[in-house]
């Protein structure tokens, strides 16, 4: 398996522009997670899905952020409009919840820079 | 509010040294505690701990959990430069909880000098 795939790997955009991050989870995994990592705040959970349904989006910073999972093999995280404080590395992870030892498999991340 | 605190925040040692990384937590609905290693990329899984007093080992790495005192330690013996990374301690709660599934500590940055 190729693992969790994220695109793009790097994104540089200007303040006010829309940004869309993409994720393909590992085939067969039924949980998908979006995280944001910054030096100041560490790794934060933004939202997670179970069987394509959003379970908890309480970590989403504000209404400028939205996430979708139209099918089991694809998810997007959108920021509109983007702001400089959104600059971070965004990770997508997937897991098979009932499988032990428990493990989330992380994608390589998207490094977002908003100027 | 659930909280995971790691110490020290950073650590510099020389090859061959033994290090101990600490993680304390204040959480509700505890299910397990996990350790991840993060180099210049995504975190990779090391251990999952659910029971007190049972040591998990993998090569030179080992970890143990104390659910009474609410802490865990990660030991690395005979450190190598390849051990240089950020080590993340993570609390796993119940799915659907207000904090989501995993709460990450800020990490301990370990630097191993030749």
Image (tube, rainbow, N blue to C red):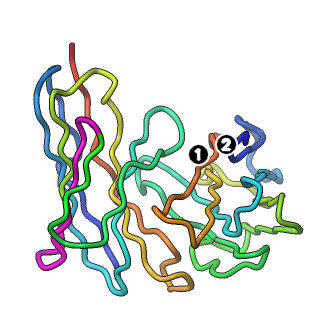
Please report the residue visible at 81 percent of the width from the left and 52 percent of the height from the top.
A20
Q: Picture coordinates of residue A17 (x, y %)?
A: 82, 50
| Pointer 2 and pointer 1 on the same chain | yes
In the rendered structure, which segment of residues is drawn in magenta? B59-71
Q: Quadrant of the C terminus of chain A?
A: top right
Element class at badge 2 = strand
Left or right of A76, for residue B93: left
Residue B70, magenta (yes or no)? yes
Letter of the chain that mark 1 sits on in the rendering: A
Element class at badge 1 = strand
Letter of the chain that mark 2 sits on in the rendering: A
Residue A110 got which mark?
2
Front one among B30 and A29? A29
Please report the residue visible at 21 percent of the width from the left and 13 percent of the height from the top.
B114
Please report the residue visible at 72 percent of the width from the left and 53 percent of the height from the top.
A26
Front one among B49 and A46? B49
Q: Picture coordinates of residue A72 (x, y %)?
A: 83, 65
Residue B113, magenta (yes or no)? no
- Residue lying furthest top in this view? B114
Residue A89 got which mark?
1
Q: Quadrant of residue B76?
A: top left
Vertical position of residue B104 compared to residue B97: above or below: above
Mark 2–mark 1 CB contact (< 8 Å)? yes
């Amino acid at each position: 398996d190729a693992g969790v795939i994220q695109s793009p790997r790097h994104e540089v955009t200007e303040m006010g522009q829309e940004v869309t991050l993409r994720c393909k989870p590992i085939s067969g995994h039924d949980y998908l997670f979006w995280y944001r990592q910054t030096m100041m705040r560490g790794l934060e959970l933004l939202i997670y899905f179970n069987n394509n349904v959003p379970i908890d989006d309480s970590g989403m910073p504000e209404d400028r952020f939205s996430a979708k999972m139209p099918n089991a093999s694809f998810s997007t995280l959108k920021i509109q409009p983007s702001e400089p404080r959104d600059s971070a590395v965004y990770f997508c992870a997937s897991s098979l919840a009932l499988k032990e030892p428990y493990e989330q498999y992380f994608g390589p991340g998207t490094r977002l820079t908003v100027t | 509010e659930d909280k995971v605190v790691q110490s020290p925040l950073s650590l510099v040692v020389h090859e061959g040294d033994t290090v101990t990384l600490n993680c304390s937590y204040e959480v509700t609905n505890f299910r397990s505690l996990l350790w991840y290693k993060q180099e210049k990329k995504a975190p990779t899984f090391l251990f999952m701990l659910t029971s007190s007093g049972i040591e998990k080992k993998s090569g030179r790495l080992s970890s143990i959990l104390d659910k009474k005192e609410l802490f865990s330690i990660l030991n690395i013996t005979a450190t190598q430069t390849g051990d240089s990374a950020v080590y993340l301690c993570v609390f796993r709660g119940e799915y659907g909880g207000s904090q989501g599934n995993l709460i990450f500590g800020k990490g301990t940055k370990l630097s191993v000098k030749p």
